[in-house]
Image (cartoon, helix red, strand yellow):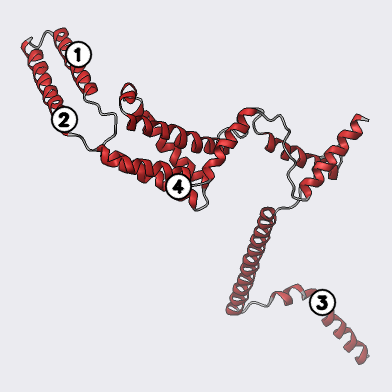
Amino acid sequence: MAATDSQSRLGQEARLVDDGITPSAPAGRGRLQETVQSIGSLAKDPKAAYSLAALFALASPFGFASPEQAAAEAAAKLQRQQQAAKAAQAASSHGSSSLAARLVANAKAQSVRRATAASTLRAVPPFWQLAGFAALFATGGYIIDHGDALNGSGVVSAWSITFLLFRTLPTLKLLPRSPLALALSTSVATLGLGVHGCHYFDQTSWRGAVPGLSTELGQQSAAAAAAGAQRGGFGGPPSRPATPQHSLLSSWKEEGVRAVQKVEDRAEDLAQHTADRTRSLLGAPPPTLARNNDEARALAYARRETKARESI
């Protein structure tokens, strides 16, 4: 009874595949995949990417340094130059033999340089970075708007990761003191990497790589295998219908065979013509006469016999 039910279910799925209908995935396919798919479905609308680009474009005027910030950066640059000069002078004053002293002096200079750079680091990116990210996010939205949601989501996701790695992480301690920088980083993490990253990851990365997540593809392959088993019998291999690719390859093969046959026929005709021309120039008998020499001798013998009988 169980075998009959299994065969009937496989037959129904096979008929669905033949009719072009994909069998529905099971209900318990996983909350993780359903959540990622539901979040990634928002990336099919370019409004998310355009909103992110608009936010960066509106924040671009705030990327210019204030007079206090410019003065602090100039002072930090001057201090770094002075520290580098002092470190070089201290390393050279110890002589060429004191390698340890020079290493210690260089380490101190580098630590001072890093501390100075961290103290002058701005939470809000410069103007040219904000404008550049706005243009890049708008490019991703433009690609999505023209029907290619996968590549558009890939563009937005890639530049979101770049912003989070090179701008958010170094200024993570400064974000609570800068609402604009916090808003930019949060928007990139949610709209950029969250929405578009989920869509791109759902469409490319884990299909077939993580067990239990590619259930729809597994159902399609199982239904196709059931259809082949029903056509060819469970004991034999499933029948494989001819595809346009196979017919195209066979037609190319037939054309190649015909072309080779034409070349061989042409070569035989040329060789025969050359042989006939050579015999005509040398005065040799045609090959038909040489092959019929026995018949000619038999005919001459018959004529001589006839003449001898008539003379008698």
Between label 4 and label 2, give the one nearer the viewer: 2
Query: Which secondary structure lies at badge 3?
Result: helix
What is the three-letter code of the residue carrying label 1?
Ala
Q: Which label's residue is closer to the chain start, 3 or 4?
A: 4
Q: Residues within 10 Å of mark 2 (few under 14, many from 20)?
A: few
Q: Which residue is mark 4?
A: 141
Q: Which residue is mark 3?
A: 295
- Answer left or right for 208 relative to 164: right
Q: Residues within 10 Å of mark 3 (few under 14, many from 20)?
A: few
What is the three-letter code of the residue carrying label 3?
Glu
Which quadrant of the figure has residue 74?
Answer: top left
Which x, y percent locates residue 216?
69, 37
Q: CB atoms at circles 2 and 1 under 8 Å apart?
A: no
Query: Which secondary structure lies at badge 2?
Result: helix
Task: Determine the CA span between mark 4 and mark 2.
Answer: 37 Å
Task: Determine the CA span between mark 3 and mark 2.
Answer: 122 Å
Between label 4 and label 1, give the one nearer the viewer: 4
What is the three-letter code of the residue carrying label 2?
Glu
- Answer left or right for 70 relative to 175: left
Question: Any mark on residue 68, and which?
Answer: 2
